[in-house]
Amino acid sequence: MDDLAYAGLKRTIKERIGIDIDAYKGEQMRRRLENFVLQRAGGQLAAWLRTLPTDVTTLASMREMLTINVSEFFRDAPQFDRLERVVLPSLLKEKRALNIWSAACSNGQEPYSLAILLNEAKADAGSRILATDFDRTVLERARSGGPYGAPDVRNLSAARLSTYFAREGAGYLVTPSLRSRIQFREHNLLSSAYGTGYDLIVCRNVLIYFSPAVKMQIVQRFQQSLRPGGVLFIGATEALLGADTDGFKALGGNFYEKEAVAKSQSTRAA
């Protein structure tokens, strides 16, 4: 696919799907899109691109391919172990009702994992978990509490599985009491407004797909959304480096605490 055709494809995706391809890592995303198109267009690229804007089936498949909705309960268990043993107890010492945001929550496994930990830590009933994603399809599944398959629940102990889930055919449904602890909402990290006053923001295995400039913008907005002393929790393969760390103190294990005064501000003051 030449550059002109690729530019047209990106424009169609932005207009019809709402995803700005230029915000993501360029070569990585281009390879994925070209493979997708090649499998469907064959030798009729120009004709295929002309019909794409009105081909709702292909657009839906493309959206699913681009959003990469892969998750499971307590994904990367050592990280969640640190959250349970170290980070949450520290936050709960300061206040018993926590305000938590699970950003890009996919099918809901992450916010439900957080709700389980809050319940077991005896956090106040006033604690709030906001779970967001820009994909309406996965949000609907998350709101419904599944059903989730065996691969999704493989990190759950038998006790947690029996306490927080009910069998539904070959899968598992989250109990109504656990579902009631979470508010699900549509949100686009690139264009939607961000809230404020969060004690914990969880955004895992998402930042790696964005370009460095866009990643920095998102991290800075997370920093502004946290209260001083609040914590950002990112994926096991992700890290904040250089300018991304402005306003954060690394806690280890992919956790970053918002400092009362950003490093850039303290430097200017000096």
Image: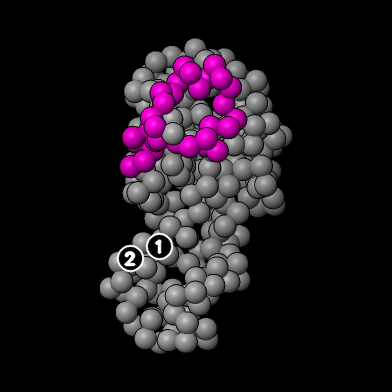
Look at 47% across and 60% down and name the residue there.
65
Q: In the rendering, at what x and y percent does residue 99 appear? A: 44, 27
Amino acid beneath label 1: Ser
Q: In the rendering, at what x and y percent does residue 98 appear? A: 46, 23
Which residues fall within the magenta stretch?
140-169
Amino acid beneath label 2: Thr
Pick the quarter of the image with the C terminus.
top right
Is 148 inside the magenta-drawn segment? yes
Total marks shown come to 2
Q: Is residue 26 in view?
A: no
Q: Nearer the viewer, residue 215 or 115?
A: 115
Q: CA distance from mark 1 to mark 2?
A: 6 Å
Label 1 neighbour load within 10 Å: few <14, some 14-19, many 20+: few
Look at 64% across and 32% down and name the residue there.
77
Residue matched to label 1: 61
Residue matched to label 2: 57
Q: In the rendering, at what x and y percent does residue 176 appear? A: 34, 23
Is 133 inside the magenta-drawn segment? no
Labelled pair 1, 2 in contact (Cβ < 8 Å) = yes
